[in-house]
Image (cartoon, coloured by chain):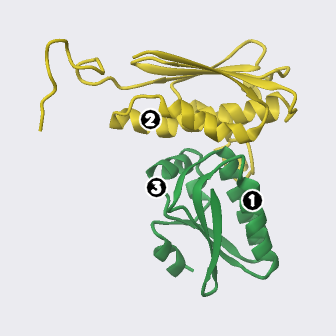
Amino acid sequence: MERQLVFELPNDLRYIEETVDFVVSHCSTCDEVARKLRLNFRVSLVEALSNAMIYGNGRDPSKRVHVEVFLGEGSVTARVTDEGAGFDPGVVPDPTVPANVCKDSGRGLFLMRELMDEVRYNARGNSVTLILHLPLPPNGSSKPPKGKKEASA
Amino acid sequence: MAFAVSRVGEVTVVDVDGQLIVGNRQELKQKVLQELERGARKFLIDFTGTGYIDSSGLGVLVSLSKKVREQGGELRLSSLNEDLRTLFELTKLDTLFRIAGSREEGLSSF
């Protein structure tokens, strides 16, 4: 079943956990999908929201973060938009090179890129779209074919 | 979300319950620094009860590890589940920290 969720969040880090819990809870529960959602999608969405609130909106409580999530059968897409001036994602250094491993910060964008299948920024740099492809059940549908019942125990 | 601090011999154990993320990492930092000020030098951060960590959580662990080392001590980690291990491996932080499979293994490693 396809679903769309849209949020407008206050620029307050305390909303992140509850928001991500809510989004992830509205997704499919097959084991392989659950793990990708629990780890890949959850962590990436947390990173995107944190970056928007801290760096994009500069921790300004008067600003807001716009969140759209589209849950399809074969993928989940999240778009997080802040009210900041934007940035160039190309200038963020690789946190895994030896000179950067010991640094206290700089891993958020890296994790998003590693965990999601696609990470796209708009031209201004204040909106990020995260796309995760999800494995489909063997018959390609989350529901049993019409006219057939699921086997009982 | 809670950080329970206890002492097992010379080791100060901090149990991370729930998640270690941008919203609560400062609390963990304060607790460890407090114990460091009191003279603790061996720290074991145990993640038995932890669901996941974000990049801020990873960052505070790096920061604390450096501060503890500056005081001649050591901070180690234990009981990472599969998801947490994945995050540490992706970010190469598994090369920075000594990570034990269990709390007991972590305690006996000191």
Residue depicted at 29% across the width and 18% down the height:
A141
Compared across the picture, whether B4 is left or right of A32 comes to right
The N terminus of chain B - image quarter: bottom right
Q: From what the image shows, is residue B30 above or below residue A75?
A: below
For the residues tagged 2 and 1, is the chain the same? no
Would you say the residues marked 1 and 3 are in contact, meaning their CB atoms lie under 8 Å apart? Answer: no
Crowdedness of circle 1 by 10 Å Cα count: few (<14), some, many (20+)?
few
Marks 2 and 1, how far apart in space? Answer: 29 Å
Q: Nearer the viewer, mark 2 or mark 1?
A: 1
Q: Which residue is mark 3?
A: B81
**Residue A41 at what x, y percent from top left?**
53, 32
Q: Tag on residue A36?
A: 2
Q: Position of residue A57 (x, y in %)?
A: 83, 28
Question: Does the image show residue A92?
Answer: no
Q: Are marks 2 and 1 in contact (CB under 8 Å)?
A: no
Give the numbered dot on residue B27.
1
Q: Amino acid at mark 2?
A: Lys
Q: Residues within 10 Å of mark 3 (few under 14, many from 20)?
A: some
Residue at horizontal 65 percent and vertical 64 percent from the top: B3
| Colour green maps to chain | B
Residue at the extreme bottom: B9
Chain letter for the yellow colouring in the rendering: A
